[in-house]
Image (spheres, helix red, strand yellow):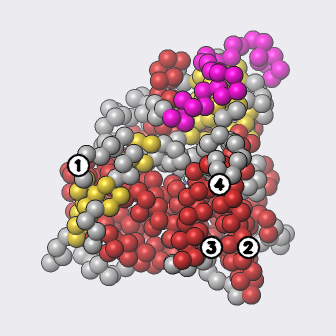
Amino acid sequence: MKTENLLDSHPLPPGSFGLPWLGETLSFLRQPNFIDQRSQRYGSIFKTNILGQPTVIMLGPEANHFILSSHVDCFSQEGWPDTFKSLLGRKALVLQDGEEHRRNRKLIRPTLHGSALAGYLTTMEQVSLAYLKQWERLESLTWFSELRRMTFEIASILLVGGKPGEDNDHLFKWFCELSQGLFTLPIHWRWTPFGKAIHARKQILIYIEQAMLQRQKTPTQDVLSLLMQAKDETGQGLSQEEIKSQALALLIGTNSNTASMLVCFCMALAQHPEVLHIARTEQHQIEQTSIDASLSLEQLKQMIYLNQVLQEVERCYPPVGAGFRRVIKPFVFNGYAVPSGWNAMYSIIGTHTDSRIYVEPTRFDPDRFSADRAEHKKMDFSLVGFGGGTRNCLGFAFAQTLIKTFAANLLRHYDWELLPGQTLTLNRIPTAHPRSGLQVKLKKLEAVT
Ligand code: HEM
């Protein structure tokens, strides 16, 4: 059937556009169960109006397969909110399409994999251990903000050659302001979150520009330097604008998402001592190390149970709740037609709670990812915390290495206790984290002999 006829022969998806102009934006930003409530009422595809756009939200592995694999030609990356696009910059990989995306993904890939990644491990471990040592001296700590600081320090050193100290503190402050503006109303006044975020973006770009000038004189081994040296098959590299945008976007991807996954990992293990016990036993079986011994990529691969725990954290608390697209060709899904010009969102949270795939989806159960059960393999695109298809997360290996390095050291050398009287309900914006920020007391374990 011709695409223009689809709209005549099929109804639009069920749902509501909400209020004029605002649509359902405020509920979307503020209600953690926005998608859950509507999918219970309307099913696996429904319409709404959020962030200034008529939008269709689609849930489940079939929807992910449709958007991320079988019908990619119906979608473009234009669908990310205007605030997100303005702050990342049009040249960021996540916002590029077609040939430009394919070429740039190939150019950026080696900077986050293989020998480059192996070279980042020592910094990841040294910074993690330094933070753990600082935190053990505190009476209590609010872990999310500290983990954001730590992951930012690692990211800024490895991506743009940031130096711990005053420089990095400025960069981190701008970075937090930028993150606050990613998913908000696009009102550009000096005092609005978006206005402050635009200012912060300019400051970070100035920092990156200066770092690029230094690397032109003296190349280094960080991602920025590798991006500046990268060449495609015709000998062409990335433009200055692209390098700046890509570096900024990589910083955002690393910091907000990785800190989110780490804080949810720490929360889940504090709530499930039986899981913590198995994860710690595995660490002791891999190798009895002293606090100063370093981990290898080979050892990280042996952490099978830790991997299952992290998959369960990804399932239950995905840092990114959804992926946005713009519909560029009308399509029909589950009997409903969606016109071009609308936005489409694949819901990561909605997929991860699908009871057709996950047994008792509300239960925290890392064993569901064991080789015997492998619930996520029943259907493709069932675990999509890092996206899927040709646009899956390019930083997956980098994030996994960072998270496992930190988690292994935490399990081997520390215990932690949740402080009473805190609210652990999840905030989802800009990335998932417990509302209290996770207040804990960290205790050093006696060395195992
Ligand atoms: C726990 C940490 C992370 C999570 C949960 C995460 C999640 C995601 C998701 C869901 C996507 C797909 C978005 C879409 O479908 O449009 C994505 C894309 C991407 N991520 Fe990550 N990410 C993480 C860490 C990182 C890190 C550390 C980096 C870089 C150092 C990174 C770089 C990227 C890039 C470049 C893309 C765009 C890929 C493309 O469009 O081809 N991410 N990420």
Horizontal side of residue 1 vs 381, given as left or right: right
Locate residue 73: give its quadrant: top right
The N terminus lies in quadrant: top right
Alpha carbon of mark 3 to alpha carbon of mark 1: how far? 39 Å
In the image, is residue 120 above or below residue 314? below
Residue receiving disc 3? 160
Q: Given this view, does label 1 or label 2 mark the residue nearer the observer?
A: 1
Alpha carbon of mark 4 to alpha carbon of mark 1: how far? 34 Å
Q: Residues within 10 Å of mark 1 (few under 14, many from 20)?
A: few
Residue receiving disc 4? 197
Q: Nearer the viewer, residue 248 or 316?
A: 248
Label 3 secondary element: helix
Q: Residues within 10 Å of mark 3 (few under 14, many from 20)?
A: many
Alpha carbon of mark 4 to alpha carbon of mark 2: how far? 18 Å
Percent from the top left, x then y, of residue 268?
31, 49
Alpha carbon of mark 1 to alpha carbon of mark 2: how far? 46 Å
> Start and end of the magenta stretch?
1-30
Label at residue 420: 1
Horizontal side of residue 9 vs 368, given as left or right: right
Residue at x-position 73% and y-position 73%: 209
Q: Counting residues from the N terminus, which is met first, the one under dot 4 or under dot 2? A: 4
Q: Counting residues from the N terminus, which is met first, the one under dot 2 or under dot 3? A: 3
Locate residue 361: give its quadrant: top left
Horizontal side of residue 270 vs 329, given as left or right: left
Q: Counting residues from the N terminus, which is met first, the one under dot 4 or under dot 3? A: 3
Residue at x-position 72% and y-position 47%: 188
Q: Given this view, does label 2 or label 3 mark the residue nearer the observer?
A: 2
